[in-house]
Image (tube, rainbow, N blue to C red):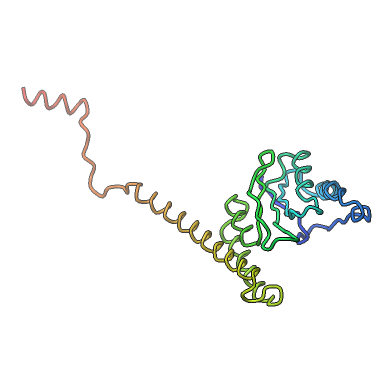
Amino acid sequence: ATTEIYTLSLHDALPILYGSVLEWVCQERKGWRKFENFKILRKGLKPRTKYVFLGDNGKSEKDFEAATRIVDAFPKELQAVFLHAVSGETQPAPLPEDSEYRGVPVMHYRTYATAAVKAFDRRLLDADAARRVVEAVEADMALDPINLAPGSANAVLLQEEIEEAYEALDGAGLGRRLKNSWRGVWRKPPSLESPVPKKGRDDSAKSKSGSA
């Protein structure tokens, strides 16, 4: 059976489920509400569907809490958690170390270019798909000179991560090509010369009788 992976984000084709006014008044309810919305979405999908959670690590959004609730309730369904590193005080935002929660990788990123590479490393995206993400990030950067003014801290950071992403994907592709080529070297091709027949019992007997 094939595995389908759905990404839980606002960019998904799935219906967007909102919270209530209570979640805006009581921020602590957001993690619970997102978990409840996930259960609603899950009911309309195939039983073996696998998911990737996208959110951010902002304190008020409670995305990590929502992700852990999903893992606790459905431990074999969430493939990975991606959290966008955000900060209202420090720019660029501090980048926490990647970790795991009950065996599910929890990965942090500042830009989608880095997220694409991490998804590729985890085999959630193939190299072509990851490269398309990086190319889209690069194209969007060129279309937004206001928020990403040339020379600004955000623009420099994004450009650096785009270049690092291309290098990582190119290196991975080269590594795989080299690995395949070495396999070809170590596999001995069939010889064109006639094989030398091994001496069997009959041949040994003939040689002994001849020498006698």
Looking at the image, residue 67 sits to the left or right of residue 120; the answer is right
Question: Percent x, y for residue 98?
Answer: 63, 48
Q: Find residue 177 and report its image quarter.
A: bottom left
In the image, what residue occupies the spot 82% across and 48% down?
Answer: 31
Q: Nearer the viewer, residue 155 or 167?
A: 155
Q: Nearer the viewer, residue 61 or 1?
A: 61
Q: Which image quadrant: the N terminus?
A: top right
Question: Percent x, y for residue 110?
Answer: 66, 60
Q: Is residue 55 above or below residue 65?
A: below
In the image, what residue occupies the spot 64% across and 69% down?
Answer: 153
Single out the residue that lies furthest toward the front: 89
Q: Is residue 143 above or below residue 186?
A: below
Question: Percent x, y for residue 8?
Answer: 76, 54
Q: Which image quadrant: the C terminus?
A: top left
In the image, what residue occupies the spot 19% across and 26% down?
Answer: 202
Single out the residue that lies furthest toward the left: 212
Total tally of numbered discs in the picture: 0
